[in-house]
Amino acid sequence: MWRMKSLLVAAPVAAGLLAAPAAQAQWHGRDGYGHYHGGYYGHPHGGNGAAVAGAILGLGAAAVLGGVIASQAYRPPVVYTPPPVVYAPPPPVVYAPPPPVYYAPPPPPVYYAPGY
């Protein structure tokens, strides 16, 4: 993963350095500076605005890219917790036997005598 991040940072820098034009150092047949060249002296000044703007934009893009790379959150550390406690099942409930049931013999039949 770090190789990929390093590549993402190094690739735009390398591309910018390779895409920059080489300095033109050809001799144009002049005797030096100060000769009159048809209306202005020397060469035109003030052509550095594009280079300054490019440098500022490049630094801004690098700051944004660096902020994105630096702000990525790391995974939380792995925490090994003990296994959950497993309790033994409760012992079987033993109930007392029900009391014995005694059946009494049915009462004798009652006969009512008429007239008493």
Image (cartoon, rainbow, N blue to C red):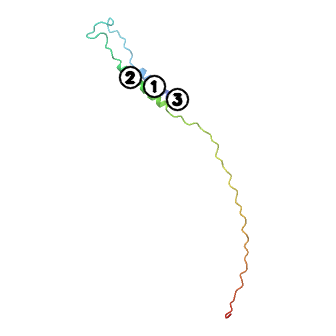
* Viewer-nearest residue: 8 or 59: 59
CA gap between label 2 and label 1 equals 17 Å
Q: Quadrant of residue 39?
A: top left
Left or right position of 80 against 97: left
Dot 1 falls on a residue whose secondary structure is helix
Residue that lies at the very extreme toward the front in this rendered image: 116
Specify which label sits upstream in the sequence, 3 or 2: 3
Indicate the position of residue 56 as horizontal and vertical percent values: 40, 23
Circle 3: is it few (<14), some (14-19), or many (20+) Cα within 10 Å? few
The numbered mark at residue 54 is 2
Give the mark nearest the N terminus, 3 or 1: 3
Which residue was labeled with disc 3? 2
Q: Residue 1 appears at what percent x and percent y? A: 52, 31
Residues marked 3 and 2 touching at CB (< 8 Å): no
User: Could you say which disc has been placed on residue 11 in the image?
Assistant: 1
Q: Is 62 situated above or below 26?
A: below
Q: Marks 3/2: CA distance?
A: 28 Å
Give x and y (percent) for residue 35: 29, 6
Q: Nearer the viewer, mark 2 or mark 1?
A: 2
On screen, 37 above or below 115? above
